[in-house]
Amino acid sequence: MENLSYAEAARRVKSAGYDGMEIAAGPDKRKEAVQVTRDNGLDLVLMAFSGGSDFADHKKRFRDDLLDIAAHKPLFINAHTGKDFFTFEQNAELIQTALDVQKQTGVRILHETHRGRFSYSAPAIQNYLLRLPELRLTADYSHWVNVAESYLDDQAENVSRAIAISDHVHCRVGQPEAPQVSDPRAPEWKEALETHARWWDAIRTRLQRANAFAMTITCEFGPAPGYLPTLPYTQQPVVSQWDVNVFMKDYLKKRWQV
């Protein structure tokens, strides 16, 4: 919905039956994001991104951005944290920075499993899971499927550790050669959809047993060009991004009878 204003996007989201929006809003757009979601009776998750290869500058910008986002009091912050080429100690320092901001502001900060970040693969994240007990995740395991070129059948223990601390879900469906299938409704992607759905089932079951107030899920099949495949030359998307995301919402509501 990059071509829509926040107000128009929020109205469309509300009318489609969603409960909230997750928005990657820059510093100059966060106040507007808060206002339009509030006006439409929607919850709001804001996103944070860390960038730059110089670690000291990277850390400062990450902390400053988290503090600015937290001041807007979103439901929580979903952070793209660190870099795959930073050392364990450097990435751990960034995670601790997020924890410090969380304790200072009272706004939860979750770290998304994503290529290019400290959490880029199921095995790469294990040291963090074992050594940083306060770490909490946003589960986007589609990236791990792509990195591993498999549905992680041989990494069940690694995935289980991540499920145990995943508090938010991005219901993108990946496949071994891409972080996003062309269309999760297509029969050729039945295995991919069911594999991811079983992981989400496990997260939901864990949260239910913990008497969690709610489970939040962002339908995040991404745009074209990029995540969504396009036809050569014309760059015409092979499917409607909006329709796929609405399908994912309805699919999970039906699966869980909610």
Image: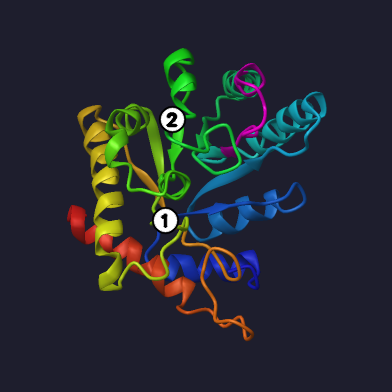
Q: Which mark is residue 123?
A: 2
Q: Residue at x 80, y 23 (%)?
A: 56
Q: Residue at x 39, y 53 (%)?
A: 171
Task: Give, as a three-letter code, the residue at label 1.
Answer: Arg
Where is residue 221 drawn, in percent x and y? 46, 62
Camera-nearest residue between 2 and 233: 233
249 falls in the magenta region: no
Q: Is residue 40 left or right of residue 142?
A: right
Q: Is residue 126 above or below residue 116?
A: above
In the picture, which quadrant includes the N terminus?
A: bottom right
Where is residue 167 drawn, in percent x and y? 39, 35
- Badge 2 marks a residue whose secondary structure is loop
Q: Residue at x 29, y 58 (%)?
A: 193
The count of marks equals: 2
Task: Give, as a three-letter code, the residue at label 2.
Answer: Pro
- Residues under numbered marks 2 and 1 in contact, where contact means CB atoms less than 8 Å apart: no
Where is residue 235 drawn, in percent x and y? 61, 80
Foreground mark, 2 or 1? 2
**What range is drawn magenta here?**
79-92
Residue beneath label 1, please? 172
Camera-nearest residue between 89 and 95: 89
User: Quadrant of residue 73 in the image?
Assistant: top right
